[in-house]
Amino acid sequence: MTLAMIGVGLLAGVLGAILGLGGGVVVVPALEFVLPRFGHAVTIGQAVAISQIGVLAVGLSGAAAYLQRGLVRARTGYLLSPYTIAGGAVGSFLGLVLPARAVATVFALLLLYSSYNLLRGLKRVEAEREPSRLVTPAMTFAGIMSGLLGIGGGTVQVPVLNLMAGVPIREAIATSTFIMGLTAVGNALVYQAGGLLDLRLAGGVALGVLIGARAGAGLQSRIPADRLKLVFSLLLIFTAIQLLWKYWGSA
């Protein structure tokens, strides 16, 4: 099972670093669908808790690579991260008390909405734009979603940074990766206190993520910006359909 966890983390790390996701959109569904095959079923709350460690690993590894290449808007990251950290603490608490179907449904709806926003922005010119006044509350919401769903907040942060803050897509992904690492620390602590974090499983996922994130950060520069947005959107739609089918298909 350890090899399976490393494999999940490897895939999550590559996709997470390329798309600024934090890997949670891979880790959470994968843990729910893969672990039962090894006789170790987990709840979505436990999967979200484990995913927080993967998000932390992506944030540390991916951000280091992006910082070396000068893609991270560090000032923007430091200014916005307090809002995502506070939101993450709130979201993590909600993750401890809300029923699994509610968490899965919110997760799916968020993915679909983020996908719509990115697809709508595919034809926009990659140039600096004046930031919207809604950036701060939107990033706080991203923090809440990261804590509640274990997704790193990239599914919200990347569209917000790109479409609302006027940051070009590559720098938006890099800055989102930087912010999510800071946010994940507090989220993981809340889930650990709530007794949902399995450190053994999380360690396997984190190891795979650390390896995959470094590779993903290098691959990201070779993919056209529009294709990045399209792949990101299709991945979000696929994951949302999976979750809705699991929790509502037999209802």
Image: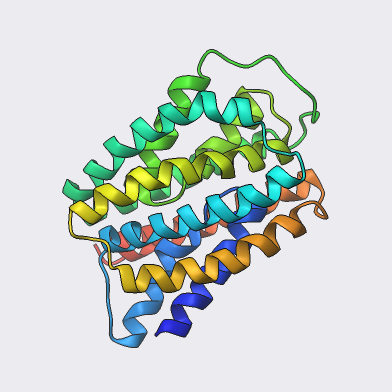
Quarter holding the N terminus is bottom left
User: Is 97 left or right of 106, judged from the image as shown?
Assistant: left
- Answer above or below: position of 82 versus 212: above
Query: Which residue is rendered at x = 53% and y = 28% of the image?
Result: 78
Query: Which residue is rendered at x = 34% and y = 57% of the image?
Result: 48
Quarter assignment of residue 147: top left
In percent of width and height, residue 148 lies at 32, 45
Quarter assignment of residue 169: top right
Query: Which residue is rendered at x = 28% and y = 68% of the image?
Result: 198
In percent of width and height, residue 125 lies at 81, 28
In percent of width and height, residue 167 lies at 69, 28
Between 97 and 10, the one lying in front of the other is 10
- Answer above or below: position of 130 versus 52: above
Between 200 and 24, the one lying in front of the other is 200
Query: Which residue is rendered at x = 69% and y = 64% of the image?
Result: 215
- Answer above or below: position of 8 versus 219: below
In percent of width and height, residue 127 lies at 80, 25
